[in-house]
Amino acid sequence: MAVEMGYTSGQLRGDINVTPLIDVLLVLLIVFMVIVPATPHGLNAALPQRSMNLSPDTPIVVQIMSARDRRLSYKINRENVTINDLGNRLNAIFSLRADKVMCIKADDSLDFSAVVYVMDVAKTAGANHIALMTAQGRL
């Protein structure tokens, strides 16, 4: 036994006996070391696979071109269409599609009012999202 300095028998001591606390700490450390490798790491998520074939829903591109006589011509995916028939054709296309996305590609020399008119026709036909393509053909 250790010699106690300055304490009389029966007097209360103010220091903490840490030996039992260290034993508890070591037991908890061993328990956590055994449990941690058993826990699963990460989530098992089903990710969508990229399909190699092209989907039947090719993007809709409406081209607005100006001729030398300043007359405008319109194409839907490289197929000629008149301005009077543009709304009906777009309505027929969007009625069959789940995604109602459309791109507009116009000549740089055009007045923007022609593009806005095609945007208005497309919104009336049911397009949800309309993108404008640059001269390089990128969105």
Image (cartoon, helix red, strand yellow):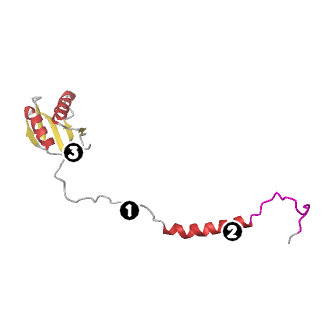
Displayed quadrant of residue 13: bottom right
Q: Secondary structure at mark 1?
A: loop
Q: Please name the amino acid that badge 2 sits on.
A: Asp
2 or 3: tag closer to the N-terminus:
2
Residues at badges 2 and 3 in contact (C-beta under 8 Å)? no
Q: Is residue 22 left or right of residue 67?
A: right
List the residue tagged with mark 3.
Answer: 99
The crowding category of the residue bearing disc 1, from other C-alpha atoms within 10 Å (few below 14, some 14 to 19, many at least 20), is: few
Q: Report the magenta residues as a range.
A: 3-18
Question: How far is mark 2 from mark 3, CA to CA?
Answer: 65 Å
Mark 3 neighbour density, 10 Å: few (under 14) some (14–19) many (20 or more): few
Q: Choose between 111 and 41: the one closer to the eye.
A: 41
Q: Residue at x 22, y 29 (%)?
A: 112
- Between circles 1 and 3, the one closer to the viewer is 1
Q: Which residue is drawn at the image coordinates 15% and 35% (left, top)?
A: 125
Q: Look at 52% across and 66% down and name the residue there.
A: 36
Vertical order, 7 against 74 (above or below): below
Q: Where does label 2 land, which residue?
A: 23
Residue visible at 69% across and 68% down in the picture: 23
Which percent across, then down, holds residue 118?
17, 32
Viewer-proximal residue, 116 or 121?
Answer: 121
| Amino acid type assigned to the residue bearing label 3 in the image | Asp
**Secondary element at image label 3:** loop
Q: Which mark is residue 44?
A: 1
